[in-house]
Amino acid sequence: AEIHDQQMADGQAAIERYQAVLAHDDTNSVALEAVDRLFEAAQRFEDLRDVLERKVLLAQPDSRVAVQYRLAYLLESNFSDVEGAFEHYRAILAQEPGHGQSVEALERLMAFESHRAEIVEALEPLYIEAGQWAKLVTALQLRRELLDDPFDTAALCVRIAEIQELELEDASGAFDSYADALKSGVSDGDVLARIEELAETANRWQDACVLLDQIASKIDDDFERRGMLAKL
């Protein structure tokens, strides 16, 4: 215990010396690296955050990503600061789109509804570029949960269905997504046509009949309802 107390005292003394240096020159790289190391060892996370923020501002382009990732992860893991972490992860990906740790971090942060739409928007072009269609579908499905407007919901369901059908060759999944588009309350002849074709491809005729019967029961116009029922 005495050795530990002495180490703590030595660490605090070292911190004070380096802080005195920084008080005269807040760009001193040797002092910044030293307090970075000492604050992290002492788990003084607020002080560490301040140091990392300064280092991000001073960093050269070839070294900024590494220190900015440390800052973003600190904000996420020690401060539960989803907004702050997201902004730094997004900035990293703007500099280095293939930064895997930042992509994984944004995928974690999608669990929080507060920034989900922005996170999906940031990940979408990366998934498309990498051909990660299953991940894109999952992200878009999570984004769909946030939508209230039936037309926006239907449009996103159709987009998901197109990816499932054309990129993933998942006829049954595409059928379900087109069905969700209809269930949103928006009537679309093209969607109906795709459902009919996919019902054949995926052997989902029974599901198609149940779906169309449900949709028809909600239609007030007799002519339109009879047309829907005629498809059964």
Image (spheres, rainbow, N blue to C red):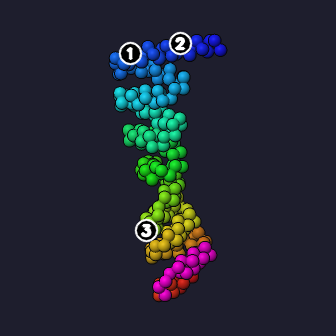
Verify CB contact (< 8 Å) between mark 2 and mark 3.
no
Tell me which amino acid carries mark 2. Answer: Asp
Tell me which amino acid carries mark 1. Answer: Val
Residue 200 shown in magenta: no
Say whether residue 13 is left or right of residue 2.
left
- The label on residue 10 is 2
Front in this rendered view, residue 180 or 130: 180
Find residue 125 and report its horizontal and vertical position in percent: 42, 50
1 or 3: mark nearer the eye: 1
Front in this rendered view, residue 222 or 195: 222
**Residue at the image position 63 percent from the left and 12 percent from the top:** 2
**Secondary structure type for disc 3:** helix
Can you say whether 185 is above or below 100 in the image? below
**Residue at the image position 51 percent from the left and 87 percent from the top:** 226
Q: Can residue 162 be seen in this view?
A: no
**Marks 1/2: CA distance?**
17 Å
The C terminus is located in which quarter? bottom right
The residue to which callout 3 is attached is 151
The N terminus is located in which quarter? top right
Principal SS element in the magenta part? helix
* Mark 1 / mark 2, whichever is N-terminal: 2
- The label on residue 21 is 1
- Give the magenta-colored segment's residue range: 206-222
Can you say whether 218 is above or below 1 in the image? below
Q: How crowded is mark 2: few (under 14 residues within 10 Å), some or many (20 or more)?
A: few
**Secondary structure type for disc 2:** helix
Q: How many labels does the image show?
A: 3
